[in-house]
Image (spheres, helix red, strand yellow):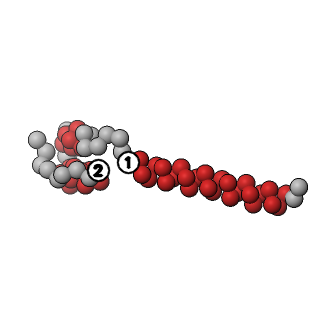
Amino acid sequence: MNKGNRSIRLTAVAVGVFGFAASLTAFAGPPWGCDHCLPAYYACQTLPDPNPTCLEQFWQCQMDNGCIITMPE
């Protein structure tokens, strides 16, 4: 058996498996939906020096998860 052919085939299989796993990860999406955006916003607000972009981070979280953009309650 030629070591060069075996190495090429093994590399091709590894790349294929990695690509398949990456595609599954890309389509899976976060399992939590929009539920984690609001607690993350409140956690940001409780910092000693609240970040002025907490609201922007909240909206970005909603956009990233395909949620309706709302104001925090």
**Residue 53: in sight, yes or no?**
no
- Secondary structure at numbered mark 2: loop
Task: Relative to 8, say whether 57 is above or below.
Answer: above
| Three-letter code, disc 2 | Asn
The residue that appears at 62% across and 56% down in the rendered structure is 16
How packed mark 1 is, by other alpha carbons closer than 10 Å (few <14, some 14-19, many 20 or more), is few
Residue that label 1 marks? 29
- Secondary structure at numbered mark 1: loop
| Lower sequence index among marks 1 and 2 | 1
- 21 and 43: which is toward the camera: 21
Q: Quadrant of the N terminus?
A: bottom right
In percent of width and height, residue 29 lies at 38, 48
Residue that label 2 marks? 65
Is the Cβ of the residue at disc 1 closer than 8 Å to that at disc 2?
yes
- 52 and 9: which is toward the camera: 9
In percent of width and height, residue 15 lies at 63, 57
In percent of width and height, residue 6 lies at 80, 56
Number of residue marks: 2
Q: Determine the CA span between mark 1 and mark 2.
A: 8 Å
